[in-house]
C-alpha cells in the first residue's frame, strides 16, 4: 500500500513538515478541504491516510473533524496551537483524533504515521467523548509532550486494539486509571461502560462478592441478588486497581476466571461468561510483587500479557510546567479568574522532585490558585510544606516545623513513609502500625484537602 500523508485545511502549505514526511517515504498530497463529493472521493481513495488538519483559528470545527473520520474511515491528526486546540479537545478525548501542538516532533509524527499504515486493517474505531484545552499533545484524557509520554502513546494505541490483559504499573499519582481510560476510549469497547474497582479498598470478606456477585441467601445479609463488577461492566472495560493487594485466595479464583472466561456468583450454581476487556493496575513493580509474595506468579503471567509503566512526573521535563499552566487555566475557567504563572514559579516547579506525581502537582496548583491574585510567584507555591525527599537519606530523621498542626504532621509522616518505601502502601502501613484501609482513608482525606476535590483536574490520578 502506498503511504500517503494527506494534508487538509487552510494551513496546508508547510514545507518543513512536507519535507520531513517525504524523507520518511511518504507521498504528500494536499487538499484545501473536502467539501465537495469529488474531494471526498479522492480522500477516501487514499484511506487509511494520515489526515492532518492544519488547525487555524478560523479552521474546521470539532464536529467537522469528527465527520471526516466517520466519512473517510481514516485516523485524524489535528495540528495547531493551544488556542485552536480548545475547539478540538472534545473530539480528541472521544478518541476520534489525536492533537499535536506546534512545533512538531518530526520523528514522532513520522513514526506514528508508520504505525497507522502498519495497522491499517484495524484502524476502524467507534466514537468516544470528552473535552478541555491545553498546549500539549493529548491522547484520550492524557496530556503530555515529553518523550516518555509520546513513547507510551504509541504503545497504548496498539494495546487498545488488543483483547489481551494489560498490566499498568507506576508510582502513586502518575495517572494509571487515566491510562486505562485512554486505552478504553480507543478500543472496540469504547461505547460500552468503563469500571474500576480498588482491590485494596474492599473488605476482604466482600472482595469475591464485589468481583463476581452473589445470589440471594448465599450468606448472612445477602437479602437480594447482587451483580458483581464482571457482570455489571458487560462488554466494556474493567480495571482491577491495586491488584497486588488482592487476597491470595481471591487471586486464585481470579486466575481461573481469566483463563476460562467464566465466573460464578458466590452461592451460585451457574457459570456465566464475561465479555469485558480486563486491565490491572498497581503502584508496585509487578515483578517485585511476585518476588515479595504479594502477587501470585501464575496470576502475574496472565495479567502481564501486555505491560506498560507510566512515567513519574519528575521524568517528564517540560510537562511539569505545561501541566501547571493547564491547571491554572482550568482554575481560571471554573472560578472566573485571570491568573498567570511567573517564570520563577515555573522554574521552581520544574526543579521539584514530585514524589506525589501529577496528583501532588495538581494539589499544589489548586491551593496556590485559591490564595493568589493576578500572578503566581515562586514564593506563593509554599512547597516547603511538602516533603521533597530527593535529597533526604532514607534513614534520616524527619523534621516537622513547629507551626504544623497535628493533622499536618501526620500527613507529613505518612507521605514521607510512603516515599521511603517507594510508594508501597502495604509496607508503609506496616511500619506506621495502621491497617491498609486506614492508610487509604488518610490519603483520600489529604487528597480532598483542596477546594473541589481531586477529580476536577485531569480525572482521577
Image (cartoon, rainbow, N blue to C red):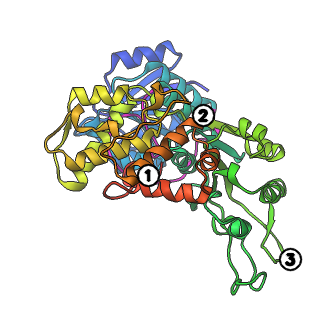
- SS type, badge 2: helix
Point out the frontmost of discs 2 and 3. 3
Q: Specify start and end residues of the magenta stretch as a single range.
A: 119-146
Query: Circles 1 and 3: CB distance less than 8 Å?
Result: no
Residue 456 seen by the camera: yes
Mark 3 is surrounded, within 10 Å at the Cα level, by few (under 14), some (14 to 19) or many (20 or more) other residues, namely few
Q: Secondary structure under badge 1?
A: loop
Kindly give the residue lying farthest to the front in the view shown: 402
Residue found at x 72% / y 71%: 209
At 48% from the left and 19% from the top, the residue drawn is: 107
Q: Position of residue 387 (x, y in %)?
A: 42, 37
Q: Is residue 223 above or below residue 190?
A: below
Residue density around tag 2, few if under 14, some if 14–19, many if 20 or more, within 10 Å: some
Describe residue 316's horizontal placement relative to residue 268 as left or right. left
Q: Is residue 133 magenta?
A: yes
Residue 111 % position (x, y)? 54, 23
What percent of the width, then of the height, locates residue 137?
Answer: 41, 34
Magenta stretch: dominant secondary structure: loop
Q: Nearer the viewer, residue 433 or 48?
A: 433
Specify whether residue 410 is painted magenta: no
The disc, 1 or 3, on the residue closer to the chain's N-terminal end is 3
Specify the label residue 269 is tagged with: 3
Q: Which mark is residue 320?
A: none
Q: Which residue is mark 2?
A: 155
Other residues around mark 1 within 10 Å, as few (<14) / some (14–19) / many (≥20): some
Q: Are marks 2 and 3 in contact (CB under 8 Å)?
A: no
User: Measuring 63% from the left and 51% from the top, which residue is drawn there?
Assistant: 242
Q: Which residue is mark 1?
A: 459
Residue 315 or residue 203, whichever sits in front: 203
Amino acid at each position: 500500500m502506498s503511504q500517503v500523508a494527506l494534508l487538509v485545511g487552510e494551513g496546508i502549505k508547510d514545507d518543513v513538515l512536507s519535507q520531513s514526511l517525504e524523507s520518511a517515504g511518504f507521498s504528500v498530497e494536499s487538499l484545501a478541504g473536502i467539501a465537495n463529493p469529488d474531494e471526498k472521493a479522492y480522500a477516501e481513495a487514499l484511506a487509511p491516510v494520515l489526515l492532518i488538519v492544519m488547525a487555524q483559528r478560523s479552521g474546521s470545527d470539532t464536529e467537522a473533524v469528527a465527520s471526516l473520520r466517520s466519512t473517510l474511515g481514516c485516523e485524524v491528526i489535528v495540528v495547531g496551537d493551544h488556542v485552536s486546540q480548545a475547539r478540538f479537545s472534545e473530539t480528541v478525548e472521544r478518541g476520534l483524533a489525536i492533537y499535536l501542538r506546534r512545533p512538531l516532533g518530526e520523528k514522532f509524527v513520522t513514526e506514528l504515521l508508520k504505525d497507522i499504515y502498519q495497522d491499517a486493517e484495524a484502524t476502524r474505531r467507534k466514537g468516544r467523548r470528552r473535552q478541555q484545552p491545553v498546549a500539549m499533545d493529548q491522547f484520550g484524557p492524557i496530556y503530555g509532550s515529553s518523550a516518555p509520554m509520546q513513547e507510551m502513546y504509541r504503545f497504548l494505541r496498539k494495546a487498545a486494539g488488543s483483547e489481551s490483559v494489560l498490566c499498568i504499573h507506576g508510582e502513586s499519582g502518575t495517572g494509571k486509571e487515566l491510562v486505562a481510560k485512554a486505552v478504553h476510549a480507543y478500543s472496540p469497547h469504547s461505547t460500552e461502560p468503563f469500571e474500576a474497582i480498588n482491590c485494596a479498598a474492599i473488605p476482604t470478606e466482600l472482595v469475591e462478592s464485589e468481583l463476581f456477585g452473589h445470589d440471594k441467601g448465599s450468606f448472612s445479609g445477602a437479602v437480594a441478588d447482587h451483580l458483581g463488577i464482571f457482570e455489571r461492566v458487560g462488554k466494556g472495560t474493567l480495571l482491577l486497581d491495586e491488584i497486588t493487594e488482592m487476597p491470595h485466595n481471591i487471586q486464585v479464583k481470579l486466575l481461573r476466571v481469566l483463563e476460562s472466561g467464566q465466573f460464578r456468583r458466590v452461592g451460585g450454581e451457574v457459570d456465566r461468561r464475561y465479555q469485558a476487556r480486563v486491565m490491572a493496575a498497581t503502584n508496585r513493580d509487578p515483578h517485585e510483587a511476585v518476588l515479595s509474595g504479594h502477587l501470585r506468579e501464575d496470576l502475574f503471567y496472565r495479567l502481564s500479557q501486555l505491560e506498560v509503566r507510566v512515567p513519574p512526573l519528575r521524568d517528564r521535563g517540560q510537562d511539569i510546567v505545561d501541566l501547571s499552566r493547564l491547571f491554572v487555566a482550568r482554575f481560571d475557567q471554573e472560578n472566573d479568574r485571570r491568573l498567570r504563572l511567573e517564570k520563577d514559579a515555573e522554574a521552581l516547579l520544574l526543579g521539584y522532585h514530585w514524589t506525589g506525581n501529577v496528583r501532588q502537582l495538581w494539589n499544589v496548583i489548586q491551593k496556590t490558585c485559591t490564595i493568589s491574585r493576578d500572578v503566581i510567584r515562586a514564593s506563593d507555591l509554599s512547597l516547603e510544606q511538602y516533603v521533597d525527599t530527593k535529597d533526604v537519606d532514607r534513614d534520616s530523621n524527619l523534621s516537622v516545623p513547629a507551626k504544623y498542626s497535628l493533622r499536618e504532621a501526620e500527613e507529613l509522616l505518612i507521605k514521607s513513609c510512603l516515599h521511603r518505601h517507594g510508594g508501597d502502601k502495604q509496607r508503609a502501613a506496616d511500619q506506621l502500625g495502621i491497617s491498609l484501609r486506614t492508610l487509604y482513608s488518610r490519603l483520600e482525606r489529604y487528597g480532598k484537602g483542596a477546594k473541589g476535590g481531586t477529580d476536577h483536574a485531569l480525572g482521577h490520578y
